[in-house]
Image: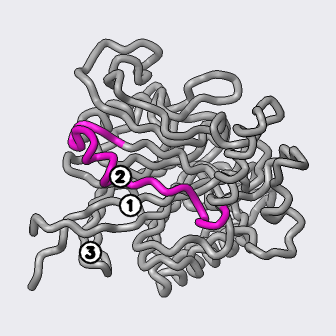
Amino acid sequence: MSSSKIKTRIVILSDTHGAKPKPRTAQDPDSDTELSQNHRIVMRLPTGFRHPLPEADVLIHCGDLTKRSRTEEFEATFSMLRDAPAKLKLVIAGNHDGALDAKFWDRYADEQSGRPGDDTMPQQAWRIIKEAEQDNVRFLDEGTHTFALDNGAVLRLYASPWTPEYGLWGFQYDVQKGHSFDIPEGIDVVMTHGPAKGILDLTRGHDHAGCPFLLSALEKAKPRIHCFGHIHEAWGAYLAKWGESAERGDQGAAEGVFKSASRTIMDLDDFWPVLADDDEGYASRVQMLKKIRREGGIEIDLTALEASGAGKDQTLFLNAAVMDLGYRPVQSPWIVDIDLPQKESG
């Protein structure tokens, strides 16, 4: 493969649960004028999840395409994806998308759908997914995938929808048996539905809900990006510099895995203006939110971050859940610029 690199833009989002991006119009009551320092309005309004989504070479959706696996939710999500201005759109399922998990659906369809005896929903969902291929939407099974992109780059990606069992949902593994995430070395992007243990996985109950088996696999593979969702309240970006393997408590939490140079790029504490902010701080946050709205997400230049440190020993972790805990689509997608290898000619 050629040593030449090609700058590639990837838009990453997750947990849209059947919601569509809110149109950007000046007439909206929650337009930019609502976010004003003078009014001191502290409202969780739609930010980067706006129509149209940002232009990109690749769009990644990390699952929870629906809320209850209903046909109209699949239709809404895949209509959004088909319309998105990206050359390639890559999608996995999440735990809410139980109609796509055949074993789960055969056993629990009544509880999941609320429509006893309705066994047509998986068929309808797969029809919608198949039709979306016409607009370069690709639904991915678990495993490693390689894509030759229109911009001349090659993307190597590992995908998995599986998360630890919690409640009655699809694509969940028995925590006693564990799950094998066979992530190869040299992978560019790992897209999973859920987080690894201890990384952007803290719930409102202050529990780390991530997967210890996924953390172990990531520690070995050290991908350039790991993107996911699932834990809405843990939205954020974290740049991790891998250290030496160490004994870890809390069933494999990330303590002891990362060097001290690891840092949070942004989380929800940085995101929303609060009344406790002084005037300068409040105004700064308002301007940031306006910028996010205009750009359709939060931009991260991974090439620059890698150049500033040991790229082979760091991973950019992104929790891209668009929904907050109240299922309001107010959190922002991520826009990542990354240099990828050029595909071979001929």
Amino acid type at circle 1 is: Asp
Label 3: few (<14), some or many (≥20) within 10 Å? few
Query: Image quarter for residue 242?
Result: top left
**Mark closest to the chain's N terminus, 2 or 3:** 3
Q: Is residue 220 left or right of residue 34?
A: left
The location of residue 128, given as percent across then percent down, is 59, 78
Check whether the beta carbons of the residues at disc 2 and disc 3 lie within 8 A of each other: no
**Mark closest to the chain's N terminus, 3 or 1:** 3
**Disc 3, SS:** strand
Mark identifier at residue 337: 1
Amino acid type at circle 2 is: Leu
Q: Is residue 145 left or right of residue 273?
A: left
Q: Is residue 201 above or below residue 69?
A: above
- Taking the magenta stretch, the answer to whether it contains residue 300 is yes
**Mark closest to the chain's N terminus, 2 or 1:** 2
Q: Which residue is mark 2?
A: 302
**Disc 2, SS:** helix
The location of residue 239, given as percent across then percent down, is 40, 38
Q: CA distance from mark 2 to mark 1?
A: 6 Å
Q: Is 281 or 247 nearer to us in this picture?
A: 281
Q: Is residue 193 above or below residue 151?
A: above
Amino acid type at circle 3 is: Ala
The location of residue 172, given as percent across then percent down, is 53, 42
Q: Which residue is mark 3?
A: 148
Q: Is residue 252 left or right of residue 110?
A: left
- Taking the magenta stretch, the answer to whether it contains residue 176 is no
Query: Image quarter for residue 231?
Result: top right
Tell me the magenta residue range. 293-315
Check whether the beta carbons of the residues at disc 2 and disc 1 lie within 8 A of each other: yes
